[in-house]
Image (cartoon, helix red, strand yellow):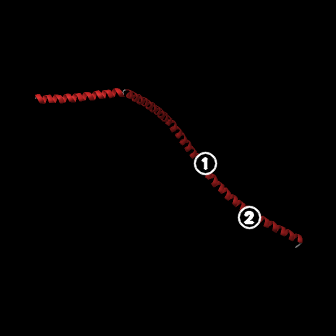
Amino acid sequence: MSLVTISLFIIALSFAFISIYVIKTLKAVSSTLTSVSGTLERVEGQMEGISQESEHLLNKTNAIADDVQQKSQSLDGVVNSLQNVGASVEHVNSSLHGMSEHVAKESNQNADQVAKVMKWGDAALQLYAKWKTKKARTEENYG
């Protein structure tokens, strides 16, 4: 065997080892890519589920927001009515206050007249009591 034959044999052997190493590396890369592909498919499925749930939650949130807005608008009338009731109560309160001030003023002005009437009433009651007593004595004396 000549040197060239030995060299060609060594080159062929090296090429075979390199080819085997490249094949093993490519198989490992293929296995890794298969695993990554499976992982990506699972993530894609989960993302699809998450996006469906998010869309469902968004629809529910919009429905709740619409419901709250409708209820808020329906309460606007109640709030306006309550404001009107408050204004009416305030008006009645101020009217009663004015009336009580007027009554107090009139009663102060008429206090003297009331006192005179009370004195006349008391005097009348005393006269009636004296008359009754006198009548009872007269009936006792003549009776």
Mark with earlier residue (1, 2): 2
User: Residue 126 or 48: which is nearer the viewer?
Assistant: 126
Q: Is residue 26 left or right of residue 51?
A: right
Distance Cα–Cα, label 1 vs label 2: 40 Å
**Residue at the outermost bottom position:** 1
> Residue drawn 72% across and 60% down?
29
Number of numbered markers: 2
| Quadrant assignment for the N terminus | bottom right
Residue at 71% across, 60% down? 30
* Residues packed near mark 1 inside 10 Å, few (<14), some (14 to 19) or many (20 plus): few
Image: 142 above or below 64 = above
Residue 135 pos. (x, y %)? 16, 28
Amino acid tagged 1: Ser
Question: Residue at coordinates 67% horizontally, 56% vertically from top-left?
Answer: 37
Per the image, the residue denoted by label 1 is 51
Q: Look at the picture and state if 20 lies above or below 77.
A: below
SS state under label 2? helix
Percent coordinates x, y for residue 8 in the rendering: 86, 68
Residue under circle 2? 24
Q: Are marks 1 and 2 in contact (CB under 8 Å)?
A: no
Residue 65 position within the rendered picture, expressed as x and y whole percent measured from the top left: 55, 41
Closer to the camera, 113 or 91?
113
